[in-house]
Amino acid sequence: MTKPDPTFWSGRPVAVTGGAGFLGHAVTRDLEALGAEVSVIRSAGHDLRDPRAARAAVEGNDVVIHLAARVGGIGYNRRNPAPLVYDNLMMGCNVLEQSRLAGVRKVVAACSVCAYPKYMKVPFSEDDLWTGYPEESNAPYGLAKKMLIVMSDAYRRQYGFDSCAPILANLYGPNDNFDLEDSHVIPALIRKFVEAVERGEDTVTLWGSGNPSREFLYVDDAARALLLAAERLDTSEPVNIGTGVETRIRDLAETIRGLTGFEGEIVWDTSRPDGQPTRYLDVSRARELIGFEAEVPLEEGLRRTIESFRQQSALAPGS
């Protein structure tokens, strides 16, 4: 496994936008362990939609890792298309432009697998990124994130500015958002199954048909990939970050059912949307360019995430 280089990070000033969030927490933890001087940029202190706030956030840093985003699952995307496209576009534009003006040496901005077209040959190749329109429910978010790749390339050609926008697979892990309305599929499934066990329920109802497939990347692997990109990725071309392993949602549900001890029936609510039919990545470019390969197998990552959620629930008020 290729690990980040402590000699690159030791004493280096680094700003992490969204550094208190799900992925940001893991990135910040790893940077601090490597000896970096980390500034955690939170929305409460810096509204990155404002150019002046973005400039204040990045000023004085060698590296900026841009993770701040408005994001959610299918339900959230369907309810909030306008802020998803506006907020993510404005944050991305301001972070890159203000980083350039402030003399930042490198920006790593997290792109999303949602940037890919709805209908794709699998596994998804970076060369096919521009062959179609994203799945409709997450297109506003996906296209806003896709613009990070366009901006990175444009700024490299115009200004010689060093940045990249790796494309991350669906993330999961401890400290994720477990809200049933707004979360992604793994935290939503974990919460439903754990609470069904606790309540002694006989059925769990899940969205869609269960037939689509996804690829799931453990948050610690994603954090390591972003640090490797900062050290080693000197191109603006898209680079997939994932496991390269396809998992059907129906199979995922059965795995989580087993790990949580739920013995009842799963009911699939086909009136709810499935989202993109198939989604997993060709990860060979990341292996070649930055030496990244995912380490945590899905079942082990799910065990850790379930345990984290149970501990979180036990500490919640009224539990």
Image (spheres, grey):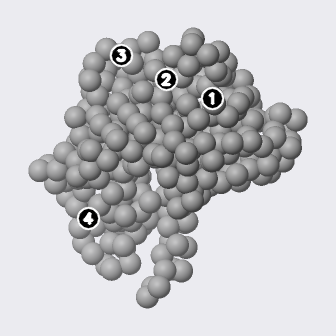
Between disc 3 and disc 4, the foreground one is: 3
Q: Which residue is mark 3?
A: 130
Tag 1–tag 4 contact (CB < 8 Å):
no
Residue 112 vs residue 159, the one in the foreground: 159
Disc 1 to disc 4, how far (Cα)?
A: 50 Å
Taking the spot 84% from the left edge, 47% from the top edge, the residue there is: 35
Tag 3–tag 2 contact (CB < 8 Å):
no
Residue 217 vs residue 36, the one in the foreground: 36
Disc 3 to disc 2, how far (Cα)?
A: 15 Å
Picture quadrant of residue 285: top right
Disc 2 to disc 4, how far (Cα)?
A: 43 Å
Between disc 2 and disc 1, the foreground one is: 1
Between disc 1 and disc 3, the foreground one is: 1
Three-letter amino acid code of the residue under disc 2: Met
Between disc 1 and disc 4, the foreground one is: 1
Taking the spot 48% from the left edge, 75% from the top edge, the residue there is: 313
Q: Which residue is mark 2?
A: 151
Residue 32 vs residue 188, the one in the foreground: 32
Q: Which residue is mark 1?
A: 100
Disc 3 to disc 4, how far (Cα)?
A: 38 Å
Three-letter amino acid code of the residue under disc 1: Arg
Q: Classify mark 4: helix, strand or loop.
A: strand
Taking the spot 32% from the left edge, 47% from the top edge, the residue there is: 83
Three-letter amino acid code of the residue under disc 4: Val
Q: Which residue is mark 4?
A: 204
Q: Residue furthest bottom?
A: 318
Q: Residues within 10 Å of mark 2 (few under 14, many from 20)?
A: some
**In this rendering, position of residue 237 left or right of residue 135:** right
Picture quadrant of residue 303: bottom right
Q: Residues within 10 Å of mark 1 (few under 14, many from 20)?
A: many
**In this rendering, position of residue 301 left or right of residue 179:** right
Tag of residue 5: none
